[in-house]
Image (spheres, rainbow, N blue to C red):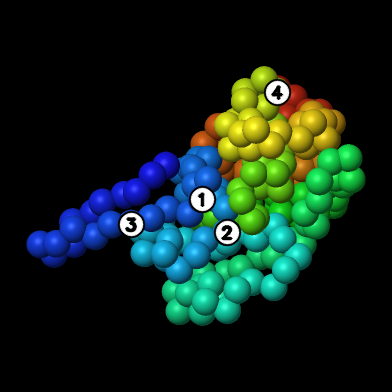
Amino acid sequence: MGIMVMEKEDEECVLFPPLNFGMIETGIYRSGFPNPNNFEFLETLDLRSIIYLCPEPYHEANSEFLRSRGIRLFQFGIEGSKEPFVTIPKDIILEALSVLLDVRNHPVLIHCKRGKHRTGCLVGCFRKLQNLCLSSIFEEYQCFAAAKVRVSDLRFIELFDISCLRDSVYCTIPRMCFPLEAPDLQREKNHE
């Protein structure tokens, strides 16, 4: 997504989205690390929360922006690394997914440094919860990762087991408009 131009009381205002910005679903966005030039654009999203996937402390200017707008920061410190030394911590992805699936946190922005690998893994696991086919999930990952696709990320997404989330999470994401329950419980309800 490129530059956005908005009219603001008889004048044009140029808005700059963060690097690798995209909409995942209504109220769920992704990007690279926002800088102060992106703050006016972020205001248009009416964010309630940010999911930050890096271990480094949040920049002071960004923290102040969040404080001044009442936006909650959820930080999940996933180390950035290069193949073949990539390790994606499943437990942290599960925690981040639980925040992402809670609609009380929406609208929400997910980001890491560049919005490629860590963000791509979380979004890919979210897409698995939506029952998208792997080829579509991989295509979306590749779109944002461009020439820096990591086979280890694709493998992590492919092997990520969503059953533990399906058994315990009630989800109101548009493609998942039913409570996620164990298959036996769902069958019992269908027979009532």
Viewer-side label of 4, 1 = 1
Mark 2 neighbour density, 10 Å: few (under 14) some (14–19) many (20 or more): many
Contact between labelled residues 3 and 2, with CB atoms less than 8 Å apart: no
How far, Cα to Cα, is label 4 from label 1?
Answer: 25 Å
Which residue type does callout 1 highlight?
Leu
Residue at label 2? Answer: 33
Q: What element carries label 1?
A: loop
Assign the C terminus to one quadrant of the image: top right
Contact between labelled residues 1 and 2, with CB atoms less than 8 Å apart: yes
Residue at label 3? Answer: 15
Which residue type does callout 4 highlight?
Leu
Residue 179 is labelled as none
Residue at 70%, 23% (x, y): give it. 134
Q: Where is residue 130 in the image (x, y as percent from the top left)?
A: 63, 32
Residue at label 1? Answer: 19
Residue 134 is labelled as 4
Of residue 1 and residue 45, the one placed in the foreground of this image is 1
